[in-house]
């Protein structure tokens, strides 16, 4: 009579086999396509013959806030931490998010007072493309970008800063777009 295999050996063998199968499936899944947050899904009203696009659509940039005037201007939303560069035909040519300082300009319309190619910011960071347009509580408010392209460090406790920092490509675009007295509209 052949020797009988104990039940613990069967259970152990089946467990090892199951774990190996899960590992193989996980490796295969890791090499397959991955969903992305920006991938559009067809709506319920999509026709049966419609095929999803191979290229995911990017969401449209936020519209320029209403009531910001007309013509060529910079629009800055304090609440959205966003800037729009609006051309003479009232179309936004570029929009981007920014890192505001601790002093926000009051809502209203300003004009670029002057520009400075480079300096050291009040936080000790080398900045360029400085575009001054307002002052509040004795603090100058200006757009700029760090020379090295970094985001600003958190300000020291109680320190008032009026620099509205942006990524380097956006700082270059704003610098190119701006001259004194370009209009700057600030909204909440």
Image (cartoon, helix red, strand yellow):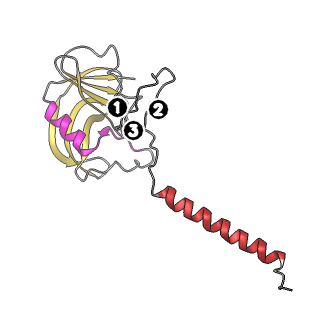
Cβ–Cβ below 8 Å for labels 2 and 1?
no
Q: Nearer the viewer, mark 2 or mark 1?
A: 2
Q: In the rendered image of this protein, does residue 167 appear above or below residue 41?
A: below
Q: Please, what secondary structure does the residue beneath circle 1 have?
A: strand
Tell me the residue that label 3 is attached to: 102
93 in the magenta segment:
no
Going from N to C along the chain, the mark reached first, 3 or 2, is 2
What is the crowding at mark 3: few (fewer than 14 residues within 10 Å), some, or many (at least 20)?
A: some
Q: For the point 68% across and 71% down, which residue is it?
A: 16
Lateral position of residue 121 relative to residue 159, left or right = left
Q: Which quarter of the figure has residue 176?
A: top left
One can see residue 136 in this view: no
Q: Please, what secondary structure does the residue beneath circle 3 have?
A: loop
- 62 or 9: nearer the viewer: 9
Q: Nearer the viewer, mark 3 or mark 2?
A: 2
Tell me the residue that label 2 is attached to: 41
Residue 180 is labelled as none
- 1 or 59: nearer the viewer: 1
Q: Position of residue 38 (x, y in %)?
A: 42, 38
**How many marks overall?**
3
Q: Position of residue 12 (x, y in %)?
A: 75, 74
Q: CA distance from mark 1 to mark 3?
A: 15 Å
Q: For the point 31% across and 38% down, which residue is it?
A: 164
Residue most extreme to the right = 1
Cβ–Cβ below 8 Å for labels 1 and 3?
no
Q: For the point 78% across and 71% down, which residue is it?
A: 11
160 in the magenta segment:
yes
Magenta segment boundaries in residue numbering: 159-179
Tell me the residue that label 1 is attached to: 82
Going from N to C along the chain, the mark reached first, 1 or 3, is 1
Q: In the rendered image of this protein, does residue 149 appear above or below residue 79?
A: below
């Amino acid at each position: 009579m052949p020797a009988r295999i104990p039940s613990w050996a069967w259970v152990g063998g089946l467990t090892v086999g199951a774990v190996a199968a899960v590992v193989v499936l996980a490796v295969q899944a890791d090499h397959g396509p991955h969903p992305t947050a920006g991938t559009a899904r067809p709506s319920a009203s999509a026709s049966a013959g419609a095929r999803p696009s191979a290229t995911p659509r990017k969401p449209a940039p936020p519209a320029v806030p209403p009531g910001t005037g007309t013509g060529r201007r910079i629009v800055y939303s304090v609440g959205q931490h966003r800037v729009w560069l609006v051309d003479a035909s009232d179309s936004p040519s570029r929009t981007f998010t920014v890192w505001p300082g601790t002093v926000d300009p009051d809502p209203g319309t300003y004009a670029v007072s002057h520009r400075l190619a480079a300096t050291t910011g009040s936080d000790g960071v080398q900045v360029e493309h400085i575009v001054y347009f307002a002052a509040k509580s004795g603090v100058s408010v200006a757009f700029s970008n760090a020379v090295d392209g970094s985001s600003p460090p958190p300000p020291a406790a109680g320190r008032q800063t009026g620099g509205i920092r942006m990524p380097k490509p956006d700082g270059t675009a704003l610098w190119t777009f701006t001259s004194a007295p370009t209009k700057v509209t600030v909204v909440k």
